[in-house]
Amino acid sequence: MRYVTKIDDQEFLVEILDEKHIRINDKILDVDFESVSGQPVYSLIIGGKSYEAYVSPDEDKWEILLRGRLYQAQVEDEREKRLRAAGSTGASESGEFHLRAPMPGLVVVIPVEEGQEVKKGQVLLILESMKMQNELKAPRDGVITRIKVRPGETVEQKQTLLSVG
Amino acid sequence: MRYVTKIDDQEFLVEILDEKHIRINDKILDVDFESVSGQPVYSLIIGGKSYEAYVSPDEDKWEILLRGRLYQAQVEDEREKRLRAAGSTGASESGEFHLRAPMPGLVVVIPVEEGQEVKKGQVLLILESMKMQNELKAPRDGVITRIKVRPGETVEQKQTLLSVG
Amino acid sequence: MFKKVLVANRGEIAVRIIRACRELGLETVAVFSEADRQALHVRLADEAYLLGPAPSRESYLRADKIFEIIKKSGADALHPGYGFLAEREDFAQACHDDGIAFIGPKPSSIAAMGDKMTARETVRKAGVPVVPGTEDVGNMTDDELLAIAPKIGFPLLVKATAGGGGKGMREVRSLEEMPELLKSARREAESAFGDGNVYLEKLVEGARHIEIQVLADMHGNVIHLGERDCSIQRRHQKLVEEAPSPFMDEELRQRMGEMAVKAAQSVDYVNAGTIECLVDKDRNFYFLEMNTRLQVEHPVTEMVTGVDIVKEQIRVARGRPLQYKQEDIHFNGAAIECRINAEDPYNGFMPSTGKITHSLLPTGPGIRVDTGVYPGFEITPFYDPMISKLIVWGETRAQAILRMRRALEEYRIVGVRTNIPFHQTLMDSHRFMGGQYDTRFVEERFAINDTNDPELAEIAAALATLSAHQQTQRAAQFVQRNERDTSNWKWVGRWERMHR
Amino acid sequence: MFKKVLVANRGEIAVRIIRACRELGLETVAVFSEADRQALHVRLADEAYLLGPAPSRESYLRADKIFEIIKKSGADALHPGYGFLAEREDFAQACHDDGIAFIGPKPSSIAAMGDKMTARETVRKAGVPVVPGTEDVGNMTDDELLAIAPKIGFPLLVKATAGGGGKGMREVRSLEEMPELLKSARREAESAFGDGNVYLEKLVEGARHIEIQVLADMHGNVIHLGERDCSIQRRHQKLVEEAPSPFMDEELRQRMGEMAVKAAQSVDYVNAGTIECLVDKDRNFYFLEMNTRLQVEHPVTEMVTGVDIVKEQIRVARGRPLQYKQEDIHFNGAAIECRINAEDPYNGFMPSTGKITHSLLPTGPGIRVDTGVYPGFEITPFYDPMISKLIVWGETRAQAILRMRRALEEYRIVGVRTNIPFHQTLMDSHRFMGGQYDTRFVEERFAINDTNDPELAEIAAALATLSAHQQTQRAAQFVQRNERDTSNWKWVGRWERMHR
């Protein structure tokens, strides 16, 4: 099985040769890959070196926390990649953005209104949780299309708070 | 639900009144009983006192390891107890005893033979495990009725090694 | 001499206090909210009583409930820990009135230091230098503050008079932004302390936050245990503390130590307390406030002095004289504490909640972990995000940093995000290693590690690919098996097993 | 100066050594058997290589494989830990021949001390008192030993000449039982060391086992780090060690320290080593043997002296002079170590195997846990049952005991049985508290706690009843639900959920 794995702008060609060997770009390496205690913590011994990392899927990416650094990787098998290249030509990613509550909490202030233009980094909402007031900010420029909560409201984790178009 | 629970020679009459109350002998107490992390470790808050113990079933008994002491308890509901009292009158407990391997290991020596009389505490078999030679002893006087393994044999945990009649 | 101590707190500090009591042969009473039934302090105490629902106002801040439990349990002493009711004069007074030993200072000392404005005035009169700022005592309106601000000069700090822990604190760079910031500071102060009153203080730039631990008994003895450097902060929240301060020399330590003893004496202080100061580049120090309680970061002092501060608090509260004279206090090696918070350093340090499914503590020589959590425990949004403190000791500061690095690398917490990667980046930074930092360092001159080490990126790629491959294989196996055997119950059984 | 250390061991000691290397900036190479793929030392090392199947003879004792891995990894130093290859002269020699720094003594010192009979003769000539026993060097037949035994007098000890850790050791009370005991001692020695040779030693009754830690560099400096009392033993296996010994006074410490330095010098010793002695009631001491390696119980010495023995071993092996002179060594407070074994104290201390499903380590001030296991790790029957070491420090011995009690009470290990209840009983025993014990104490005057505290028995009854009730209720619910809804897949789904 051949995969193309992208981290930042770097592409790695990774081929799973068998249970104990992989090829990364041109190197063939021994691998021994196991989950520790059935947790999303993985021990990888590769070419004799021992690594341990948290690995978890995050929507269409994989997050790897390794030696205090966070990597985000996109893994595609070669066939998928070819199909995608042949098909749609880099569809726009500027759809509506939904601000979700990163944790349960209490909505304190919403300093924006529907229809208002906002800049990337502008505070959209203040959520109180763990005795802290947390500022939730716009991930990009846009317009507030919908506000679904009010100050004083208690929200659940992942609940949609407002949308930016 | 009423239970009779016996520890050593002491009997406790325990009645489960509802989810939060029990009666022990004549005392009614608040209880809050929860497993910790889904493990056989239980946190019990009873009449305000906080205890934590390992609780596990062991054949027809319960073993409770509490504050560095091991208690063995027999719990019967009242109905069972009455039935038992009415029925069989203290059947003999001197049936055949099967010596089982307490852990996987290697049989080193079997210093007894079939048909031999043995005394309580006499060494019946030496099992090597964890770099230690462990002496398995007779739990009571009797006669060796059957030896099922040989020196040099590797045995699994709980495998029957020999029987004492 | 009291025998049973009610610990009016939760989390790691409740555990810390229960341990000290147990080692002194004292019985302990825990209190807990509905969210904390399985918390470690409940599991470890001799007795435990429910306070109420999860929110602090309905549980850990319910003084009335705590007094009920004192009566019910027969506790004859109370340790407040930090936060919650620790610095409430009225609460301490109520304990005294009920004949309960309050393990902390006198109510009058709490009052004198609790109102930060009063405290400034008190120590200033005792000859202790303070940061320039509002000098009147009492509640001031926004208009009054806006009028005074230009005289103090910008940048300045809005601070809660009932403050602590950076709550209700705001930096103000200009008069224009001040009204909005006053509003949010008052809001946060009101929510944290039930008191929205604030005052102003000049922002001393390039300063270090250095504090002095003091211990005082009921017999007039006051000593200090040297300093802690707490300059590594983010949004006025301390993240890393160390003792000794890499900035300190013997002469400054002595001057600051004497000042701290003087400040404590000015309010007739008893028990453990901390004098927080700013120290500027020229080694001038200014009193900020006194914390009239045990501090989060007390372990670094314990590790370099060998003094068990909590046990000493208890002894002092029992009326005993201090075990140590100033000349008995020696500083050995270096200690560093990293506060481990359930928050995501890659997402603006947003708090992270959830069940801890697995953890592996760093252990071995020179390591101490003070924690209130364990695998299976649920981190809720109701309390402080600090879930543990990792403290290391080394013969030298360099050895302590190396040890902290290996401890952070070993530490695993699964189920919530933590700021461990932040600490790892910090311990690798040359400025931290060189001791070259001030209170603005984290916010202004530090970034969480996102450099792309090519070798590690390759390993990350391998990890991601192997995980993705494993997921694909599992799905394929599942389809295959399902094709082979379509009887209903086996199908479900397998599915259940796979999703455990 | 070496840069990459292969750690030829497993378990807690491999972890301990890897940590020391990491804190010194050295790279580490772990080796592992098939049973240890997920062991902590594999997880923490920079590199890891498979040795072979689980049994030690096919893995950790395979010197040839280890040399292959040295070549493959480019390691330029080796730390043997304790046990396995730690005291094999030929192995140390092979390291030297290959230009690999062996972090331990010279092969000649290992040889001189490794044969216990030769060692006795060597130190005797250097003026160190030894326990009366067989004096000839070389292999002796059973007949020869049976002839000599009456001259030494009973009771006596049969000991393996290649011995250590109590293996291949037997007490003999009379000539009649001696042939059988010789046979079993030789069998165990053969199995443990590949050498069935034994010798005899008078059994000194009522004696304490006290040992002196020494450190020596390549520049002729030899110092001692005081004593450890290891008299708490069962079947010649140490269970608890403490420093200082409650039996010790300054004069005896000085005499024994000087003796230990002399014994080390008699074999031109370099690196860390331990002189084990018996000390009788009249404070006469007798050399037993020298362990030419790191000891299990080294942490208690580290905690009272502040010296990191493993780091010092590594520095010495790099050719550096000792960091300390004898006069730099001071003893501060008291430390106790409890060896936590996977064995059932209520069933003849039978080893216990299985997967650790959950654990909670005691933490907080003055606590150190050195462990190689964690939740999810499987304890197999192939290796030593010691799974962790709990070490505490206190300002006084009494405080250390109180701290150990609270730490033992907090410690949870689920999945295997442990000897924690044994340690709890010991820490509660008046004789231990009074320091009144000798090497026979555990076997002759100690019983695991089975006293019936009526209050606790009632709690145990409540716990058992509530558990039984919960079980009954669950079964009833299951039947009820099954009656309500008999569609096949839902039934199975519930069943699966209940049995997770």
Image (cartoon, coloured by chain):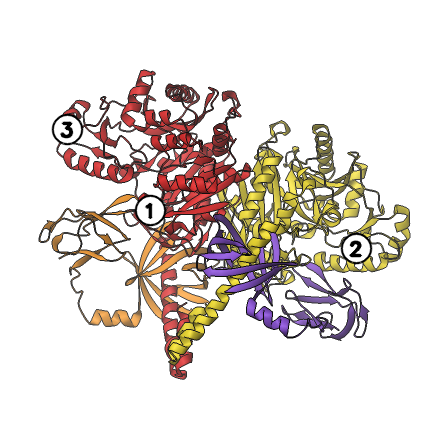
Chain colours: A purple, B orange, C yellow, D red
Q: Hey, which quadrant is residue D437 in on the image? A: top left
**Of the residues shown, which amino acid type is indicated by label 1?**
Asn
Above or below, D361 relative to B79 = above
The answer to whether dots 1 and 2 both sit on one chain is no
In-front residue for pair D81/C22? D81
In percent of width and height, residue D96 lies at: 41, 30
Mark 1 is surrounded, within 10 Å at the Cα level, by few (under 14), some (14 to 19) or many (20 or more) other residues, namely some
Q: How far is the residue under mark 1 from the one under mark 2?
A: 59 Å
Q: Chain of mark 1?
A: D
User: In this figure, which residue is indicated by the disc labeled 2?
Assistant: C197
- Tell me, yes or no, if residue B32 can be seen here: yes
Q: Amino acid at mark 2?
A: Asn
Q: Which residue is mark 3?
A: D146
Mark 1–mark 2 CB contact (< 8 Å): no
Q: Residue at x 58, y 42 (%)?
A: C404
Q: Is residue D36 left or right of residue C305?
A: left
Q: Does residue D22 sit above or below C4 in this rendering?
A: above
Q: C249 or C494, which lies in front?
A: C494
The residue drawn where x is 60% and y is 28% is C328
If the image is split into quadrants, where does the C terminus of chain D sit?
bottom left
Contact, CB < 8 Å: mark 3 with mark 1?
Answer: no
Does residue D402 appear in this view?
no
Report the front residue among B28 and D366: D366
Which residue, given by chain and number where applicable, does mark 1 sit on?
Answer: D449
Marks 3, 1 in one chain: yes
Reading the chain from its start, which is encountered first: label 3 or label 1? 3
Q: Could you say whether the residue bearing mark 2 is in a helix, strand or loop?
A: loop
Mark 3–mark 1 Cα distance, whole angstroms, equals 40 Å
Name the outermost residue toward the left: B115
